[in-house]
Image (cartoon, rainbow, N blue to C red):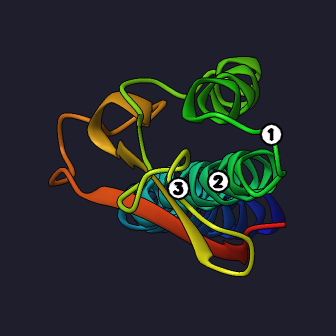
Amino acid sequence: MMTMCSRVIKRSSLSRHVRRRAVAAVEFAVCLPVLVLLVFGSIEASSFIFLKQSLSVACYEAVREASQADATADTATAKAVEILDSRQVNDFEIRFPDGVAGLERGQQCVCEVSAPTHSNSPLAGDFISNRMLTARVVMLKE
């Protein structure tokens, strides 16, 4: 009698163990896509934040260079290109809408730096719609 009872208990606990493993596998299958989406989304968001910050830094340095008394658009553009190249930003565009050479002391010197998100995305460039990120900085000419 004892052996029969112990077999029933072993079978019951084994069946419960197998069912629990099956439930855990289903929970994992449901949660894994959400976790992967969160990880890749975080990486992509961080990449876009880095891109925007890189554009801001390059724009600030370019307009700072352009606001000097003896500055030219070429020297200011070279400063921005140096920064953007060091940060591996692709397909950027640097503009001085009002020019640099004709500005008098005290006038506003404006610089705009833009780059697309598509060519600067490490992961999901093909899956996320392309946007142009732009940084704009204004300083007074010295």
Q: Residue at x 70, y 48 (%)?
A: 66
Asked if the residue under mark 1 is in contact with the one under mark 2, i.e. CB atoms within 8 Å, the reply is no
26 to the left or right of 5: left
- Helix, strand or loop at disc 2? helix
Which label number is shown at residue 70?
1
**Position of 121 compared to 18: left or right?**
left
Disc 3 from disc 1: Cα separation: 35 Å
Relative to 33, residue 30 above or below: below
Amino acid type, residue under disc 2 in the picture:
Cys
Say which residue label 2 marks.
59
Of mark 3 and mark 1, the one earlier in the sequence is: 3
* Residue ID for mark 3: 48
x and y percentages locating residue 138 in the rendered image: 62, 76
Asked whether residue 15 appears in the rendered view, the answer is no
Between marks 2 and 1, how big is the CA–CA gap?
Answer: 18 Å
**Of marks 2 and 3, the one in the foreground:** 2
Dot 3 amino acid type: Phe
Mark nearer the N terminus (2 vs 1): 2
Is residue 62 in sight in this rendering? yes
**What number of labels is visible?**
3
Q: Looking at the image, tell me whether mark 2 or mark 3 is earlier in sequence order.
A: 3
Where residue 97 appears, as percent x and y from the top left, is 35, 59
Q: CA distance from mark 2 to mark 3?
A: 16 Å
**Which residue occupies 76% across, 19% down?**
86
